[in-house]
Image: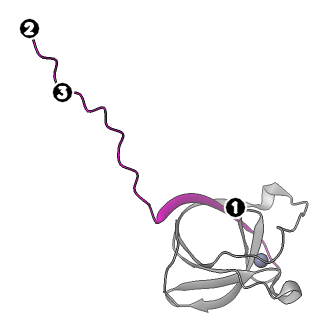
């Protein structure tokens, strides 16, 4: 009786990937571009040589603490807890620039 080859029926172990591929959009702002992530808008806060710090576009109105950092195609979430719902805006999608990025959580870049 021939033995069937051992089959690897085990599910691949689920590991936590701190890196996620995601899509963000850039829209033209008055001076700087606006970054859109999950329908939330982020405005340029600080530009540094190593990248740009963005903070939530609702910061002025709601003191929202959500902020992120971009360096090339890396988006680091500094804080993703918004204290409000995403603003609902009609956008002209023709002006949005789509960008594939890698999102990193729990970073300590700044
Ligand atoms: Zn916010």
Specify how the rendered protein is coloured: one colour
Q: Tell whether 42 sits left or right of 9.
A: right
Q: Is 19 one of the magenta-colored residues? A: yes
Q: Indicate the quadrant where residue 4 lies.
A: top left
Query: Element type at marker 3?
Result: loop
Q: If you read the primary sequence from the N terminus, does the residue marked by circle 1 or circle 2 appear first?
A: 2
Where residue 18 sits: x, y (%)? 46, 66
Farthest residue to the left: give it.
1
Residue wearing tag 3:
6
Q: Where the N terminus falls, by quadrant?
A: top left
Q: Which mark is residue 97?
A: 1
Query: Element type at marker 2?
Result: loop
Q: CA distance from mark 1 to mark 2?
A: 62 Å
Q: CA distance from mark 3 to mark 2?
A: 15 Å
Where residue 51 sits: x, y (%)? 54, 84
Q: CA distance from mark 1 to mark 3?
A: 49 Å
| Depicted 91 relative to depicted 71: above or below | above
Q: If you read the primary sequence from the N terminus, does the residue marked by circle 1 or circle 3 appear first?
A: 3
Q: If you read the primary sequence from the N terminus, does the residue marked by circle 3 or circle 2 appear first?
A: 2
Q: What residue is rendered at 61% in x and 90% in y?
A: 47
Where residue 94 sits: x, y (%)? 80, 55
Q: Which residues are magenta?
A: 1-29
What is the crowding at mark 3: few (fewer than 14 residues within 10 Å), some, or many (at least 20)? few
Q: Indicate the quadrant where residue 34 lies.
A: bottom right
Q: What residue is rendered at 44% in x and 60% in y?
A: 16
Residue wearing tag 2:
1
Q: Are marks 3 and 2 in contact (CB under 8 Å)?
A: no
Q: Quadrant of ligand 1?
A: bottom right
Q: Are marks 1 and 2 in contact (CB under 8 Å)?
A: no
């Amino acid at each position: 009786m021939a033995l069937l080859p051992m089959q690897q029926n085990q599910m691949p172990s689920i590991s936590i990937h701190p890196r996620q591929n995601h899509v963000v959009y850039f829209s033209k702002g008055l001076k700087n571009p606006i970054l859109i992530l999950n329908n939330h808008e982020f405005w340029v806060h600080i530009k540094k040589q190593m990248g740009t710090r963005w903070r939530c576009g609702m910061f002025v109105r709601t003191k929202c603490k959500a902020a992120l950092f971009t360096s090339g195609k890396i988006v680091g979430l500094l804080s993703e807890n918004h204290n409000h719902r995403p603003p609902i805006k009609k956008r002209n999608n023709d002006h949005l620039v789509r960008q594939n990025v890698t999102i990193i959580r729990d970073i300590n870049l700044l």
